[in-house]
Amino acid sequence: MPSHADPEKSLGFALKKLQQTLRSRMDAALTQAGLTTPQYLVLALLEDHPGISNSELARRSAVAAPTMLKILDALAKAGYIERADRTPQLRTRGTTLTDSGRSRLALASATVEKFESLLRDAAGADGPVISAWLRTCTDLLMGAPAAADPDAAPASG
């Protein structure tokens, strides 16, 4: 038996290929709105959670803190967000959308909705089950040890 996964039969490889394809297609489409996929996600998160911390934005976006700072710097430079000054009393800086950021988000949302609709249509009635399964797998993998030992117990947390 081979010691590697068959890419044609592997769920992991299929998911990775889907993610890469979705990301590249969304990035190409969002270029028309002057955004990348991570920038769009940050604007959407800020719309739903004004003042959210940088660390929470990074966590919800599944990027490292230094990467989030680069995304926020680019969005601030473009005038799409405002970042509150850090004060001695506050360890975090609240970030909010500007009117320009809201307009940009609205423009980009129509593009993203086309991709979401395509995915929902492909999933059909199984969409909620697929979505729940993906979230469950993510949670399981987040708690799994990074070691290559398949018999290792999941990390407690």
Image (tube, rainbow, N blue to C red):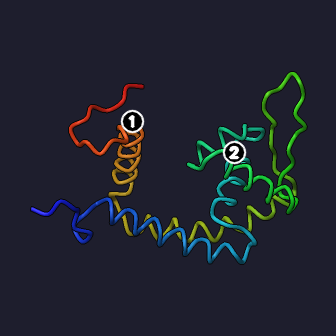
| Residue 31, placed above or below residue 54 | below
C-alpha separation, residue under disc 2 versus residue under disc 1: 27 Å
Count the marks: 2
Mark sitting on residue 31? none
- Classed neighbour count for the residue bearing mark 2: other residues with Cα under 10 Å, few (<14), some (14–19), many (≥20): few
Location of residue 157 by image quarter: top left
Image coordinates of residue 97 in percent, x first then y, are 81, 50
Q: Nearer the viewer, mark 2 or mark 1?
A: 1
Most extreme residue toward the left is 1
76 horizontally vs 127: left or right: right
Q: Secondary structure under badge 1?
A: helix
Residue at the (50%, 67%) spot, across then down: 117
Among the 4 quarters of the image, the one containing residue 65: top right
Q: Which residue is painted at 35% across and 40% down in the image?
A: 140
**First-in-chain label (2 vs 1):** 2
> Residue 9 location, x and y as percent?
22, 67
| Marking on residue 143 | 1
Camera-side residue of 79 and 107: 79
Whether the residues at callouts 2 and 1 have beta carbons within 8 Å, the answer is no
Amino acid type indicated by mark 1 = Gly
* Residue kind at label 2, given as amino acid type: Asp
Residue closer to the observer: 62 or 96: 62
Q: Position of residue 95 (x, y in %)?
A: 80, 43
Q: Which residue is mark 2?
A: 48
In this rendering, would 81 be left or right of 40?
A: right
Q: What residue is at 55 percent from the left and 73 percent from the top?
A: 24
